[in-house]
Amino acid sequence: MKLYEKFADEIAELIRTGVLAPGQKVPSVRHASSTYGVSPSTVFQAYYLLESRGLILARARSGYFVREQARRPLPEPGISAQQAQTSEVDVSELVFSVLGSLKDPGTVPFGSAFPSPDLFPLARLARSMARAVRELSPGAVIADMTEGNADLRRQIALRYMVGGVMLPLDELIVTNGAMEALNLCLQCVTRPGDLVAIEAPAFYATLQVLERLELKAVEIPVHPREGIDLASLAESLQRLPIKACWFMSSLQNPLGASMREEKKRALYELLQRHQVPLIEDDVYAELYFGTQPPWPVKSFDREGLVMHCGSFSKCLAPGYRVGWVAGGRYAEQIRRLKLMTTISPSVPAQAALADYLQHGGYDRHLRRLRHALESQQASMLASAARHFPAETRVTRPSGGYFLWFEFPEQVDSLKLFRLALAQGISLAPGPIFSATRRFGNCARLNHGHPWDAASERAMEVLGRIIGSF
């Protein structure tokens, strides 16, 4: 064992035994170096290791602190092993019954698909909307309808460039949220009855789109930390006539999994060999907790095989319903299909977002948002460790605002959903995330709302209900 690893284990033992309590500051680098007789670089390496283990957290200009969930962390779930098979999709009624539970404002919104609107700069966006509408020329109202507002597309292209993707402007098409972008992409490359590879578990809207378009799902297992099982995908591509893949390579919903850069490259090369297009759903791209944004699979695309879809709904303006797609070789088909259906998202909303991206301090907002979501994740993990059965497993995503819980086998998450709802608590039960209604003992919980006493009480109530099975 290297010296920094040994030192890290000593600090970890202090955390596990409660000598260093959750929220408490760990010794400064200078103090630790002199007290323990090790070099500052050794201390830094040890603290970086403890960060990667989820035990401590760095705060700007303040030092390192013990994370709240470090007292009794619940273990992570494993990958769900299953032979990929084709499935008819029939989940909409179940999904709608779950979504209907979110309409009551008095319900604790652990089942919500959005973070709290209080985390968004709505007043600043309103000022951008007012200014943009005043300055909007009559010609622009019509000229930019199909491709989208030119200023907004330039701002989106600049963010791609910062992320290492040089994107031609004519490849970008603004859409009515990411869901329209994803629908258009799928319609461009499939016909009713075709097979589409999706994740297992997958975002329930993915399943609803496949159901509406009469497509069949091929479920590919997802590791809760590392993402898509490439071996399973390779076997499925070899065995089945898959026409498209719809994956989230970063901060996957519902698991929060993020593929490493080398694995994303390997995914692209696999799809390139089979010439199967990838619809990359990347709506949580801006919600990473680290210092570097994750690179999309699109960054490796040399042939226009990847249709990369994004949105402002999860990170800035949920009600504006503005998304986009970088369509690759399919851009013209997507543009024509959009012209045949919705024509254009709201022109004033696009102009408002373009103004905000230019003048509103978007990156400052994102830093505040990420910090809030990371803190709220720690609070939910800590609460789950206090109130849920010890056999519970939970993911630890490096961003976003969802946690995926795997409860003891006897727990029926659909029954848990109904019992919790009767107590004023919503959650998203596991079966709505699978074409075959698997994950019956799992649930997705949203930590995207400010943590308060009601949140803590809700976790305590859930823990009692789970323990009653």
Image: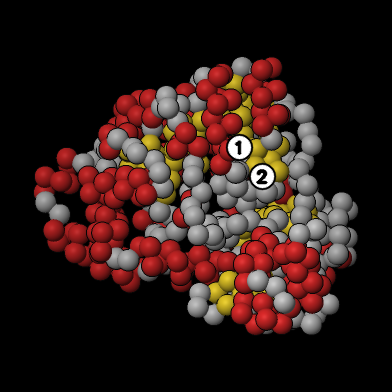
> Where in the figure is residue 99, as x and y percent of width and height?
59, 54
Badge 2: residue crowd in 10 Å (few <14, some 14–19, many ≥20)? some
Q: Quadrant of the N terminus?
A: bottom right
Residue 336 picture quarter: top left
Lower position in the chain sequence, tag 1 or tag 2: 2
**What residue sits 43% from the left and 55% below the top?**
313
Residue 318 visible from this viewpoint: yes
Left or right: 26 in relation to 213: right
Residue 201 visible from this viewpoint: no
**What residue sits 61% from the left and 61% below the top?**
446
What residue did someone put label 1 on?
Answer: 263
Q: Amino acid at mark 1?
A: Lys
Left or right: 102 in relation to 348: right
Front-most of residues 190 and 421: 190
Front-most of residues 405 and 169: 169
Residue 415 picture quarter: bottom right
Look at the numbered disc 1 and give the secondary structure of its residue: helix
> Where in the figure is residue 464, as x and y percent of width and height?
82, 70
Q: Amino acid at mark 2?
A: Glu
What residue did someone put label 2 on?
Answer: 226
Front-most of residues 259 and 33: 33
